[in-house]
Amino acid sequence: GDKLVSLSIETRRRSSGLILSYSCFTLDVVASVAFGIHVDSQKNPEDAFVKNCKKFFEFSMLRPILILTSKYSPSFEVNYSFSMRRDFLQLMLDALPKKEQKTLSEDEIVAQAFIFLIAGYETTTSALSFATYLLATNPECQEKLLQEDVPDYENIRELPYLEMVIAETLRMYPPAFRFTRETCKNCIVMGQCIPAGAVVEIAVGHLHYNPEFWPEPEKFIPERFTVEAKLQHHPFAYLPFGAGPRSCIGMRMALLELKITLLRILQKFKFEISPETQLLPTILWGANDESWEDTVKGTHV
């Protein structure tokens, strides 16, 4: 959090600087937590890990993360044998019984790396970016958030309005507007036969903007997610991370990162919209630093 605040102080007088700071910060966090790699993507943009992560999201079909994981996979072996780092991959190795310990295959490393890269980097950067915009354009909500008592880390869950803001942000701008599932058996849905092995697409974006479940869906209303309101929700009308046993395994990491980051930066800054801000409907691969401009006003710098 302190590192992000420092980055934001450096860029607070520049429009569109904060989104880049978010991107660098979340990439540094996921590099450390998931891979046990210490990078400073703001100061070292040419670092191999940083370059390949960014290329992965710019050119998704090329999947250069294969290069990234092959470069660093030997270090996972070394960490396990000697340094015993507490990163995500190390914990997976620890979970194996001693007699079954083995080096992860490249496919296993890529699969887990992809999930945590999505949850810890891309998802979090996008959510922080959209939350910033929504709070800047809804100053009354930002003021409510600023009035919330700040607990210590152990009591981070005792911030109900912050959780409501994050939940509403993920409703309006879910990490994925659609995802798929493969049916394991034949079933009938509304008179339609869906055979086993069929791929079914769930339109998350449609669900999150369906007025049957969300009155005035285009409006930012964090109060949709009060404890009482959530009891009235349809169990499958809100799916920012999917649902069931195959929901995103990086969900808790992403939500914790969102809470801590927003909490820390709002202790130092107030979000305001720049007069030049214009949001145009554009299809993007994730959050884009040029999709809007923002001005961050320091309050306790």
Image (tube, rainbow, N blue to C red):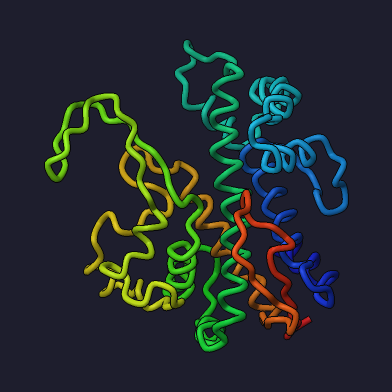
Q: What quarter of the picture does the C terminus occupy?
A: bottom right
Q: What quarter of the picture does the N terminus occupy?
A: bottom right
Q: Seen in the image, is 30 located left or right of residue 231?
A: right
- Counting from the top left corner in percent of width and height, residue 257 is at 57, 57
| Quadrant hosting residue 129 | bottom right
Q: Judge by depth and name the residue closer to the eye, 162 or 285.
A: 285
Residue in the picture at 70% in, 79% down: 269
Q: Judge by depth and name the residue closer to the eye, 68 or 278.
A: 278
Above or below 268: residue 112? above
Above or below 82: residue 36? below
Residue in the picture at 81% in, 49% down: 40
Above or below 34: residue 195? above
Q: Seen in the image, is 195 located left or right of residue 293?
A: left
- Counting from the top left corner in percent of width and height, residue 50 is at 77, 41
Residue in the picture at 34% in, 58% down: 207
Q: Judge by depth and name the residue closer to the eye, 10 or 241.
A: 241
Q: Seen in the image, is 242 located left or right of residue 253?
A: left
- Counting from the top left corner in percent of width and height, residue 164 is at 43, 72
- Counting from the top left corner in percent of width and height, residue 255 is at 50, 57
